[in-house]
């Protein structure tokens, strides 16, 4: 059993998540590569490709739980430098790593790094052409509030895309994945980040997140239309798409 199971309410959940990402911020991207065998890069590229960002100047996107800006930078690259993005995250340590990297990559003119909560964006209605969130929504205590906010800040005609771990739909892969996530990930987390417990928490949060169909239902309830999803690597991750019509 995991120590964090005693953690009850949503404030505690958010506090726990904040602590985890504060601790891992500096090593976050390296750890991602190790934990996913580099696959998170392919999955993020698949999301950006499905988004097909416009190359029209003034096309605006919001990347929520954007962390170190990895997805946002891929979106700007795919738009050939046209897109203007806001990277929003609740964790200042993650944002600081991202802002520094944006300067190094000369993308600081395209990207704004903003501290904020996915459940209460404090951004104007109808401001963005696209809303993206990658490996973020399962950390948000009230997913429905986050989805309502996504809908609110999008322009009519705007696109919602979410990349998240999901339910493995291949029986053999499922077994391998279980062994990987319950044994290897906490072990790597312990050895490399000296923080086994945080990684146990992350694995558990993946297990608790709704499967493809249930999450699609939640997106529809927020008002989105033409909701579809694509599985990646047999359902280890999935991308959900919806439109604000
Ligand atoms: N999107 C980035 C990526 O794919 O590399 C970062 C993903 S990281 C696994 C999850 C991020 O969600 C962390 O940076 C964390 O601070 C952020 N987060 C957690 N709860 C949040 C909330 N309520 N609002 C906004 N961001 C949140």
Image (cartoon, helix red, strand yellow):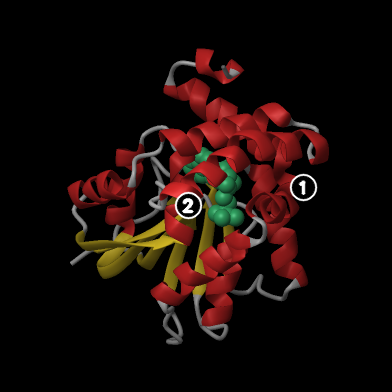
* Residue under the point 38% across and 51% down: 169
The extreme front residue here reads: 172
Q: Residue 7: where, in percent of width, then height? A: 51, 16
Q: The residue tagged with tag 1: helix, strand or loop?
A: helix
The extreme top residue here reads: 6
Which residue in the protein does label 2 denote? 236
Which quarter of the image is occupied by the N terminus?
Answer: top right
Q: Quick check: can you spot residue 163?
A: no
Q: Quick check: can you spot residue 58?
A: yes
* Residue under the point 45% across and 35% down: 207
Q: Left or right: where does residue 168 sit relative to residue 98?
A: left
The Cα atoms of the two marked residues, 1 and 2, are separated by 25 Å
Q: Nearer the viewer, residue 75 or 202?
A: 202
Around disc 1, counting alpha carbons within 10 Å, would you say few (fewer than 14), some (14 to 19), or many (20 or more)?
A: some
Q: Residue 89: where, in percent of width, then height? A: 55, 48
Foreground mark, 1 or 2, reads 2
Mark 1 CB near ligand 1 (8 Å cut): no
Which quarter of the image is occupied by the C terminus?
Answer: bottom left
* Residue under the point 29% across and 68% down: 158
Residue 10 vs 228, above or below: the answer is above
Are the residues flagged by discs 1 and 2 in contact, CB closer than 8 Å? no
Q: Residue 215: where, in percent of width, then height? A: 30, 46
Disc assigned to residue 88: none
Q: Residue 208: where, in percent of width, then height? A: 42, 33
Disc assigned to residue 26: 1
Residue 31 vs 185, above or below: the answer is below
Residue 204 vs 94, above or below: the answer is above
* Residue under the point 28% across and 55% down: 151
Q: The residue tagged with tag 2: helix, strand or loop?
A: loop
Residue 33 figure quarter = bottom right
């Amino acid at each position: 059993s995991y120590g964090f199971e005693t953690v009850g309410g949503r404030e505690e959940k958010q506090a726990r998540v904040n602590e985890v990402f504060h601790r891992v911020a500096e090593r976050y991207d390296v750890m991602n590569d190790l934990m996913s065998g580099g696959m998170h890069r392919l999955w993020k590229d698949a999301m950006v490709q499905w988004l097909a960002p416009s190359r029209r100047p003034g096309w605006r996107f919001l990347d929520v739980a954007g962390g170190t800006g990895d997805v946002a930078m891929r979106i700007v690259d795919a738009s050939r430098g046209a897109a203007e993005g806001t990277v929003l995250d609740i964790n200042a340590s993650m944002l600081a790593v991202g802002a520094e990297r944006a300067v190094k990559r000369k993308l600081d003119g395209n990207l704004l790094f903003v501290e904020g909560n996915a459940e209460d964006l404090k951004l104007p209605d109808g401001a963005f052409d696209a809303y993206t969130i990658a490996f973020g929504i399962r950390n948000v205590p009230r997913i429905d509030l986050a989805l309502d906010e996504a809908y609110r800040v999008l322009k009519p005609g705007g696109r919602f895309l979410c990349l998240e771990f999901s339910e493995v739909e291949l029986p053999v892969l499922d077994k391998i994945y279980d062994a990987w996530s319950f044994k290897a990930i906490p072990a790597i987390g312990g050895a490399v980040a000296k923080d086994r417990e945080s990684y146990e928490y992350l694995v558990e949060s993946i297990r608790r997140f709704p499967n493809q169909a249930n999450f699609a239902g939640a997106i529809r309830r927020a008002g989105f239309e033409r909701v579809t999803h694509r599985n990646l690597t047999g359902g280890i991750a999935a991308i959900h798409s919806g439109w604000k019509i």
